[in-house]
Amino acid sequence: MPTVIKKKIKKKSVETEAGVKDRLSDIRTSIKNRQKTVVTYSAIVLIIVVGITAFFLYRYSTKEKSRQLEYSAYKYYYNLYQQKPLSKQEQFQQAVDLFEKAYDKNNSPTRLFYIANSYYELEKYDEALKTLNDFTKKYPGEKNIMPLVYQKMANIYLKTGKTEDALKIFDSLYKAEGNIYKDLALIESGRILEKNGKKTEAEAKYKELIEKFPASPYFSEAEAKTGEKKEG
């Protein structure tokens, strides 16, 4: 009787099949993880884009509202296009309220200066002076407006009888960049010094005005004060 030959079962094919399945499972897991990562990053990018878009839309809307408020404030400040006459109190109170709202939405040196001017016109000198001091701290580089700020501060000190403070501000005005109001600073400083009995110092201011600002509207006054009026 022939001998039955037993065939050995090859484990290699089974192991290979299991390995392929494992690899396929790993690939599927990897793909799912990548998909999750892509979805996560896409969501983050979308959130960022939406956030940036919303920010710029809000910024544009805020600026536009600020401009509208500023325009309305100018109309009250200069008393333009009003349906009925306004008292000075009503005119500048409306102006300061609107300028402040515009400034809150979008800071601007011009708006802050007009807030101070409105308070000045309302004779609220403490509020005006505080606003002007804030201006000097927040916008020291505003070369075109700063002389106007100093001039307004000096006027407040003169109106409230604080001549020494006014003298200091006129000195700051004279030292400011540019030539705007420098002759005013000299003539006003001379007047204050003269009133305080400091005639020598006052005369020095008048002479400086004569020398440096011959086209000044205060030139004749300075000449008269020093007695240096030329003949012919």
Image: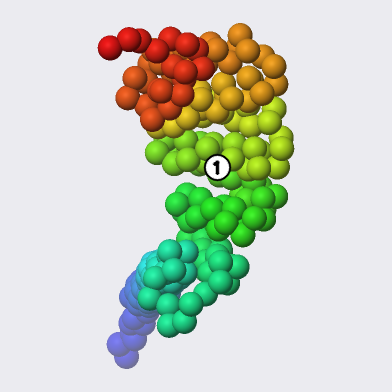
Residue 102 visible (yes or no) = no
Provide residue 165's location: percent of width, then percent of height: 68, 31
Q: Picture coordinates of residue 8 (x, y %)?
A: 36, 77
Single out the residue that lies furthest toward the bottom: 1
Q: Residue furthest front?
A: 232
- 63 or 91: which is nearer to us? 91
Q: Residues within 10 Å of mark 1 (few under 14, many from 20)?
A: many
**Residue beneath the point at 67% across and 55% down:** 124
The amino acid type found where label 1 is placed reads Lys
Image-quadrant location for residue 72: bottom left
Residue at the far left in the pictured view: 232
Name the residue rendered at 43%, 82% in the picture.
Answer: 83
Q: Which residue is mark 1?
A: 152
Looking at the figure, which quarter contains the C terminus? Answer: top left
Q: Nearer the viewer, residue 27 or 31?
A: 31
| Location of the N terminus (image quadrant) | bottom left
